[in-house]
Image (cartoon, rainbow, N blue to C red):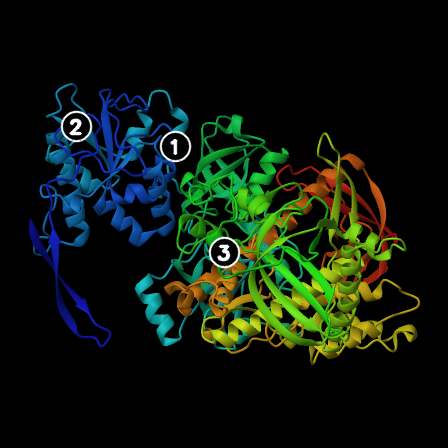
Amino acid sequence: MLTSRTFLKRTRAGAVVKVVREHYLREDIPCGAAACRLCPPRPAGPGTGLEAQPSGAASSLCPGPHYLLPDTNLLLHQIDILEDPVIKNVIVLQTVLQEVKNRSAPVYKRIRDMIQNPEKHFYSFTNEHHRETYIEQKQGESSNDRNDRAIRVAVKWYNEHLKKIEDEEIQVILLTNDRINKEKALEEGITAYTCEEYIKSLVANPELVDRLACISDEGKEIESGKIIFPEHIPLSKLQQGIKSGIYLQGTYRASRDNYLEATVWVHGDAEENKEIIIQGMKHLNRAVHEDIVAVELLAKDEWVAPSSVVLHDDGQNEDDIENEEEKENILKTSVNKDMLRPTGKVVGIIKRNWRPFCGMLSKSQIKEARRHLFTPADRRIPRIRIETRQADTLEGQRIIVAIDGWPRNSRYPNGHFVKNLGSAGDKETETEVLLLEHDVPHQAFSQNVLSFLPKMPWTITEQDMKYREDLRHLHVCSVDPPGCTDIDDALHCRELENGNIEVGVHIADVSHFIRPGNALDEESAKRGTTVYLCEKRIDMVPELLSSNLCSLRSNVDRLAFSCIWEMNHKAEIIKTRFTKSIINSKASLTYAEAQLRIDSATMNDEITTSLRGLNKLAKILKKKRIDNGALTLSSPEVRFHMDSETHDPIDLQTKELKETNSMVEEFMLLANVSVAQKIYEEFPEFALLRKHPAPPPSNYDILYLTIFFYFLFPSFQNLEIKTDSAKALAESLDKAESPTFPYLNTLLRILTTRCMMQAVYFCSGMDNDFHHYGLASPIYTHFTSPIRRYADIIVHRLLAVAVGADSTYPELTDKHKLAEMCKNLNYRHKMAQYAQRASVAFHTQLFFKSKGVVNEDAYILFVRKNAVVVLIPKYGLEGTVFFEEKDKPTPRLDYNHEEPSLTVEDTTLRVFDQVKVNVMLDASNIQHQKIRMVLVEPKV
């Protein structure tokens, strides 16, 4: 049956047009109930539909067999309840699914996953195309009311329809938290309950009540009822204010070190007021880290400077507002006018970016209390008030909590318990926490994704050899860290008859196995990168590819993408060519093994000769790069030696880099530059490139301040850092040596690293600044690691099209889609870096847990108002030494921001001072266990 839907639409020019769409209604859409013989069979696909005998939780309200049918708001807000294994046999209407899709992409994805999960028995019913459940919108009826009516019509139809099943009468129950919708449903003879009524009726699952989202803030507000925060301006007024320039829109970034301070990064191209400081609880006005907010700038005489004080919210009493005001006064110390920054206040929320948060329960001191505070693991997130009856069980556990709302008269947001992850301090639990907190997709690959892997046993076919060069005769070898199984790259070097040298970089041909648009490709694109933790690797692609078919292991035939240069002995490129190939690596070496071969007086085989040739050329290439102004910066990297049985760290040292590390790096950089030039030449509008922006001059302030102070000493008179170009910076860093202070150069390079911008992926057609500052290269991309980076897969696809080895597809030549993809890749890379750092921090804690107190030499990196940040070179470990301790008299502190220096009693501490510290694990706060450092020398 054909009907039509009519609606009005406003065009870009402002005109209103009438749109008429054909709308097909059908009679053959199945109801999804397994026992139903009246409907046609359900089409094959993921999910199993509704059970004939509905299993699930037993309810005292509806003891008979029943299916559940939730409305839109219930799905949006109570998704955590619906995901619980006891909730089964749920009908999700098309009306509801469409509304959820428009309002929350993450919730929509979670519902789709449940519909596809065969154990959940969720069924998606296409009610908008079913002849008996489709309804027209009445005149004067709002879309919302029409959709509520469509839901009630579908429930009625289901109940009538299921009565016709002979064996057993199954009831359909409407779940809604909408009071009016529920009243109308009851008037129409439909059984309807609120989510809370139904969940509280589940006889065997009282713990599910904890997972109820607290939608209405009534009854949850602090008893005092005192208004703490200003009201948020409605969205419509905010949008008008942003258009007219009264308000600024930006991303809210809370401070890790000071819970009463945040920064808003303003969206848009305007250079001024790009970064706005927000200080004080009322001005923060219930914004949460990563929310999109509207900010009103304060008058210039109210501007403040970024605070140098470290403040953590560790109070237990949520009504202690006076204490907050006292803490806010600490921030307002007199500062130099030059330090003042644009300052504002949050006037409204444009988009909440709340996610489930990991952390621990801070159990209330009131006996039998149900209301407790939850402390998130991420210090940038405020504490959350939840209600739970399981406080005794959850104490000492890592749990997940979701925020439901934040009323004006509540010091903290309200939320609900979602899941218990396990005991705090347990290695598995802590790894799970850091993966969740850094949004690293780490679930097992789904069957759908795995179905696109090649069938084993796999062999190279005639078809695979098409457009491929056979390079199996070459003496190719790989050089990697010990224990590496995902070998992306291999190299060869040989002398040509004309006296020149041929060098090849051979990269795993991952794009041969991952074809555009399938589930495997989509999953890899979502993950974006492999994440390397201290003892675990979260693969971007399934293990069959990462450790087997794509890994360029020795003595097996493998598909590769080769970049081959003809060079002279001065490492000048004469000719470059790219080809898909087949290789057979003759050796898989570690950096140390390769170094031994190069240094050996007795070894002269083909592989060793090849390595020596590569090493010789690499040194020339590196010198050229550095002469061009490439930076050699420093960030202390740490390696753990693990106990073979307990897998606990037994030794901790900074990583030692060999000549062979540099050798491999040089050729990878050269391949990336060569490929970048080729794909940009072929596809100037949609090449995926990588750039590293030059830091703005203000980034170097900390470096200048440090140098300025040291310049006063005779032995540092030649110390001068120039930052007008990467070349000038590189040269001045090379010259920054002091005979009395050998570690100075490393510290300067570490400090300079902190001044750098983040390197990012971008689409060539959407940007005109391609320069890579750190490498001093006019163009750059990532081509050499497709097993662990999705960007490289896209670059392979572009290069394959450029050399006629593969065909293109629409998304590859859509610069807007490519720009969107770059955004996700940049986010995933950033989060992977943070997750890796968190893993190192956790393993460092495990190491010091068994060590007790350790006394070590350290250098001061930064000076704060009430603390100094130090670096211990032996471990590459950074930590903060505080001078204010609980239950101890506070020493006299005098902070000078111009030097910068901190005088503790009569001892003055400055950046780069050498000190001695005691290092130990502070486990007093089980959630935020931390390495505690205490100054031993100089004695204060």
Q: State the residue position of label 1.
A: 84
Amino acid found under the numbered disc labelled 3:
Ser
Rendering quarter of residue 329: bottom right
Nearer the observer: mark 2 or 3; the answer is 3
Q: Going by the picture, which residue comes out furthest to the front?
A: 497
Q: CA distance from mark 2 to mark 3?
A: 46 Å
Residue 460 vs residue 499: left or right?
A: left
Percent coordinates x, y for residue 904 in the rendering: 81, 57
Nearer the observer: mark 1 or 3; the answer is 3
- The vertical placement of 382 against 271, above or below, is above
The reply to whether residue 876 is in sight is no
- The residue shown at (15%, 47%) is 129
- Judge the density around disc 1: few (<14), some (14-19), many (≥20) Cα neighbours within 10 Å: some
Q: State the residue position of label 2.
A: 36
Amino acid found under the numbered disc labelled 1:
Asp
Percent coordinates x, y for residue 399 in the rendering: 52, 36
Report if the CB atoms under discs 1 and 2 are less than 8 Å apart.
no
Q: Earlier in the sequence, mark 1 or mark 3?
A: 1
Q: State the residue position of label 3.
A: 511
Q: Nearer the viewer, residue 39 or 614?
A: 614
Report if the CB atoms under discs 1 and 3 are less than 8 Å apart.
no
- The residue shown at (29%, 41%) is 74
Q: Going by the picture, which residue comes out furthest to the bottom?
A: 724
Q: Earlier in the sequence, mark 1 or mark 2?
A: 2
- Judge the density around disc 2: few (<14), some (14-19), many (≥20) Cα neighbours within 10 Å: some
Residue 339 vs residue 818: left or right?
A: right
Residue 593 vs residue 144: left or right?
A: right
